[in-house]
Amino acid sequence: MGYAEKRGKTWRARWYGPDGRLESMSGFTTKRAAEQYAADQEAKIREGRYINPRSGKITVTEWVNQWFPALDLELSTLENYRWLTEVCILPAFGARTLDSITTEQVDAWEADLVRVHGYSRRTAHAARSVFSACLGAAVPTRIPANPASRRRSSGKRAERRIAKVMEQRRVWATPLEALLVAERMAAISGHQGYFVLGVFLAYTGARWSEAVGLTPECLRLRDGVIDLDWKLYELNGYFYRSYPKAGSVRTIDMPPFLAALLQEHLAKQGVARCTCPEDAQDPYCRGAEYVFLGPEGGHPRRSDF
């Protein structure tokens, strides 16, 4: 049975937790308020909704150090999460306890990332998404609700309507524009293979990492199809090989002219094997034949392409 104790000028609520330990919460101005709080905790225990008040006292930094190592995500996603956490989240909330954070504070922080710190709206949105995933993992064992969860009704209606219209008006390159971009890629680099790479990207819809990771055996030129089975993703200066994003392994058709262009490209490409070190550890590339390589055998790098 919960009860109240006098503590100087204030009252402390006492009750027994699910494990039989005597719990407490201080700072109540009246005995009745302390007793009511203790009674509420006992009701939550009976209903299976109880959260130990001490559980939310862990700092965000301490919680991140528990949450992050348990994530099972792609290396590129983990690297992105790490950067957003270290650069955007921890400087603002690292010393705060989980139970002290409010939705209003998270809203203000997301806005300040753009207005004060100069990050793009996309980066601020991504940072909040990571923070929401982090705090969401603490519900309901440490906090009752996720203060970083994005409310559907947040934001101005006009801004949401404009964003929807602009999304529908997304500009796609015309065949001529795609050809001009591919020609510019070859002209600036002095490497004809990059012209083929530009045309390939425009007419297949392949992701950059899927094009860089394309191997000759994935080209079925006689059938006019391409198997997008792998990707090469640049991370910390190296390339690791894995399945496409979200497991989107697929076979796509290609127009006849592209099949002929690829066949000619493979015949003329002077270097077919990449220069990745053979002693690299999995899942990093250890050297293999690829369709698109630089003139010296290096992989095209998205970071500076």
Image: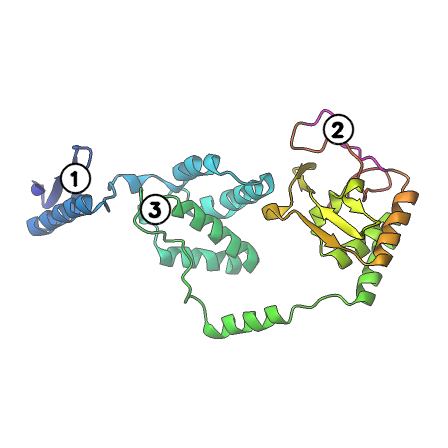
For the residues labelled 2 and 1, the Cα–Cα distance comes to 60 Å
Q: Main SS type for the magenta part?
A: loop
- Cβ–Cβ under 8 Å for marks 2 and 3: no
Q: How many marks?
A: 3
Crowding around mark 3 (Cα neighbors within 10 Å: few <14, some 14 to 19, many 20+) is some
Q: Position of residue 160 (x, y in %)?
A: 50, 70
- Identify the amino acid type marked 2: Pro
Residue kind at label 3, given as amino acid type: Val
Mark 2 neighbour density, 10 Å: few (under 14) some (14–19) many (20 or more): few
Does the rendering let one see residue 190? no
Q: Earlier in the sequence, mark 2 or mark 3?
A: 3
x and y percent of residue 124 in the render? 52, 55
Q: Which mark is residue 24?
A: 1
Q: Which residue is mark 3?
A: 139
Would residue 60 be found to the left or right of residue 300 on screen?
left
For discs 2 and 1, the disc positioned in front in the rendered view: 2
Q: What amino acid type should be assigned to the residue bearing mark 1?
A: Ser
Q: Which of the numbered marks, if any, corresponds to residue 57?
A: none
Quadrant holding the N terminus: top left
How far across and how far down the image is residue 206, in percent?
71, 53
Who comes first in sequence, dot 2 or dot 1?
1
Graded by Cα atoms within 10 Å as few (under 14), some (14 to 19) or many (20 or more), the crowding at tag 1 reads many
Mark nearest the camera among 1 and 3 is 3
Label 3's element?
loop
Q: Which residue is mark 2?
A: 277
**Residue at horizontal 7%, vertical 51%?**
32
Residue 279 position, x and y percent, is 72, 24
**Quadrant housing residue 14:** top left
Magenta stretch? Answer: 272-280
Secondary element under disc 2, as helix, strand or loop, is loop
- Per the image, is 56 magenta? no
Residue 54 located left or right of residue 293: left
